[in-house]
Amino acid sequence: QVQLVESGGGLVQAGGSLRLSCAASGRTFSRSIMGWFRQSPGKERDFVAAISWGGASTYYADSVKGRFTISRDNAKNTVYLQMDSLKPEDTAVYYCAADSMFYMTANSYNYWGQGTQVTVSS
């Protein structure tokens, strides 16, 4: 069993920044892709960003390109989501996910964090 522990969520004004962290622990897994998803009230869970083990391959939702940056520190078993120029529409519960063969498909990820609230005020 893999545990994902998230931190860094909170309340920020539009135009501000937050950095989310997700630390993985427990049993090792063979599928190296890790990602971030988000869900707003009344909406489906949406893909945000994903990254390969070495960081050479990254993918972003169109809505966050140029504003969000995903990275990872394998020595710390941690993936990060740097969120800049935040907008009110970024408000959502953000979920860290791990162990997937596909970058953008939520159902392909085997492990999920508990979610952390990000609220962006106008």
Image (cartoon, rainbow, N blue to C red):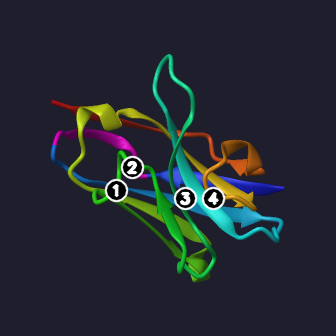
Query: Comparing marks 3 and 1, which lies closer to the viewer?
Result: 1
Q: In whole angstroms, how far apart are the C-alphas of marks 4 and 3?
A: 17 Å
Q: Amino acid at mark 3?
A: Cys
Residue at (53, 78) in percent of width and height: 55
Look at the numbered disc 4 and give the secondary structure of its residue: loop
Quadrant of the rendered structure where residue 4 is? bottom right
Q: Does 27 sit left or right of 96 as displayed?
A: right
Query: Comparing marks 2 and 3, which lies closer to the viewer?
Result: 2
Q: Amino acid at mark 2?
A: Asp
Q: Nearer the viewer, residue 10 or 70?
A: 70
- Report crowding for label 4: few under 14, some 14 to 19, many 20 or more residues within 10 A (C-alpha): many
Q: Which residues are magenta?
A: 8-14
Q: Does 36 lie within the magenta span? A: no
- Earlier in the chain: of badge 4 and badge 2, it is 2
Q: In whole angstroms, how far apart are the C-alphas of marks 2 and 1?
A: 5 Å
Image location (x, y in percent) of residue 84 = 25, 55
> In the drawing, what numbered circle is on residue 62?
2
- Earlier in the chain: of badge 3 and badge 1, it is 3
Q: Does 13 lie within the magenta span? A: yes
Look at the numbered disc 1 and give the secondary structure of its residue: loop
Q: Amino acid at mark 1?
A: Lys
Q: Which residue is mark 3?
A: 22
- Do the CB atoms of the residues marked 2 and 1 lie less than 8 Å apart? yes
Q: Which residue is mark 1?
A: 65
Q: In whole angstroms, how far apart are the C-alphas of marks 4 and 2?
A: 14 Å
Q: Which residue is mark 4?
A: 103
Look at the numbered disc 2 and give the secondary structure of its residue: loop
Q: In whole angstroms, how far apart are the C-alphas of marks 2 and 3?
A: 22 Å
- Report crowding for label 1: few under 14, some 14 to 19, many 20 or more residues within 10 A (C-alpha): few
In the picture shown, does residue 34 fall above or below 7?
below
Q: In whole angstroms, how far apart are the C-alphas of marks 1 and 4?
A: 15 Å
